[in-house]
Image: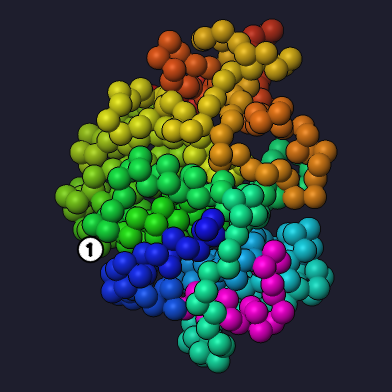
Amino acid sequence: MSNLAQNLADTAAATPDAPAIKLGDMVLTYSQLDQASSLVAGLLAERGVQAGDRVGVMLPNVPYFPVVYYGALRLGAAVVPMNVLLKERETGYYLKDSGAKAVFAWHDFFAAAEHGANEAGAEAISVVPGEFEQLLAAATPRPEVVDRADDDLAVILYTSGTTGTPKGAELTHGNLGSNVETVLNMFSISPDDVILGSLPLFHSFGQTCAMNACIKGGGCLTLLPRFEPGEALQMFGRDGVTIFMGVPTMYSAMLHDACADAADVSKLRMAVSGGASLPGELMRAFEDKFGCDILEGYGLSETSPVASFNQPGQPRKVGSIGTPVPGVEMKIVGEDGEELPQGEPGEIAIKGPNIMRGYWGRDDATAEVMRGEWFLSGDVGKVDEDGYYFIVDRIKDLIIRGGYNVYPREIEEVLYEH
């Protein structure tokens, strides 16, 4: 059974009354989340959605997101997560390109979603607190989790890329399942953990590492719909947060917030950074202040996302994205695809069970980034004698000055020292 939604059903069966999702004072237990998702599956089925169809999800970090996400997966449909700030033209593109049958949209952004849905011939379902519950209550629950194969589509994640229109990375149940397992084992997530969910759930980092790994491990995900450093710091104490996952700008904002000195971080056991390179100065300052190590990792939408990590229990190298996670291989290649010697910068290539099936409907774009089983990341990196990888920059971000290659990352490191 490969369906990612099975993780929710299993945890709900094991610990039905444990808190799954929290938002302020509101708590959804695992059995409530499981039940609500089976009603979403029923609602979609009644509207003609079948296994294999695509369903858009345009929701902020609110409990409705996991409810709808697992509901669609439970039915065997594939989820198309969408940034809530997309404009009408963009929603139309996402829904049309993916051929979505329906889209669930937060009431504040419903106009843009509805406009795009009309253009794409999809049904737009407004998510208004209170009204949405009534809509679900009228549906017939579908508690069974539809069988899916490892290579069946689970999620289409659109990546902006540096050129042209966004491409949809096809992530299968096998891709995401393997990456969730990796994160779960690496961070030792258990029912005792409380993860601060401030990363957008429509993005691969928040979706795999925070939400899906938390649900599989039986922990509690406490949501912050819009990142406010002061509020995040208060949640550490209020909710007993044990794991924080963020991008470098979040670490910087919390470090410099007025609430930083008073924050209760006594339960915090792990901080994880990704999404962009974490400047060494910032890492050291945050750790001095909060007494918790930050582990930095690396990945892309196309890799589900985690590819490498400074893994717990192994030596950590500041400025490094660590070593490939279990089951994943990485190498540095030149323009001809040949592996380069250690220390020499080149493109990072990745291979493993986490690599996407391809870009949705874009065989040309898929062919550009796949070399057999190897995925070309578009990132310039190098590897040291211990097998630790370092990002030098994006291939497209190179500055050539007086014949010398200048990487923006090097300039940023210098700026952060001031």
Task: Residue at 31%, 67% (x, y): give it.
Answer: 14
**What is the magenta range?**
36-59
Would residue 122 be found to the left or right of residue 328 on screen?
A: right
Task: Residue at 28%, 53% (x, y): give it.
Answer: 190
Residue 229 vertical placement versus 68 (above, below) = above
Whether residue 256 is visible, yes or no, is no
Residue 48 part of the magenta segment: yes
Whether residue 71 is visible, yes or no, is yes
Name the residue that disc number 1 marks: 238
Q: For residue 75, which quarter of the picture?
A: bottom right
Q: For residue 402, which quarter of the picture?
A: top right
Q: How many marks?
A: 1
Residue 310 vertical placement versus 4 (above, below) = above
Task: Residue at 59%, 18% (x, y): give it.
Answer: 332
- Label 1, secondary structure: give it: helix
Residue 407 position in % (x across, y down)? 58, 20
Would residue 10 be found to the left or right of residue 57 on screen?
A: left
Q: How is the image coloured?
A: rainbow
Residue 226 vertical placement versus 248 (above, below) = below
- Quarter containing the C terminus: top left
Would residue 411 be found to the left or right of residue 25 on screen?
A: right
Task: Residue at 71%, 32% (x, y): give it.
Answer: 370
Residue 54 position in % (x across, y down)? 69, 65
Residue 316 vertical placement versus 80 (above, below) = above
Mark 1: give few (<14), some (14-19) or many (20+) Cα within 10 Å.
few
Question: Looking at the image, which is closer to me, 128 or 32?
Answer: 32
Residue 274 position in % (x across, y down)? 46, 39
Question: Looking at the image, which is closer to me, 165 or 334?
Answer: 334
For badge 1, the amino acid type reads Arg
Residue 251 position in % (x across, y down)? 37, 43
Residue 191 part of the magenta segment: no
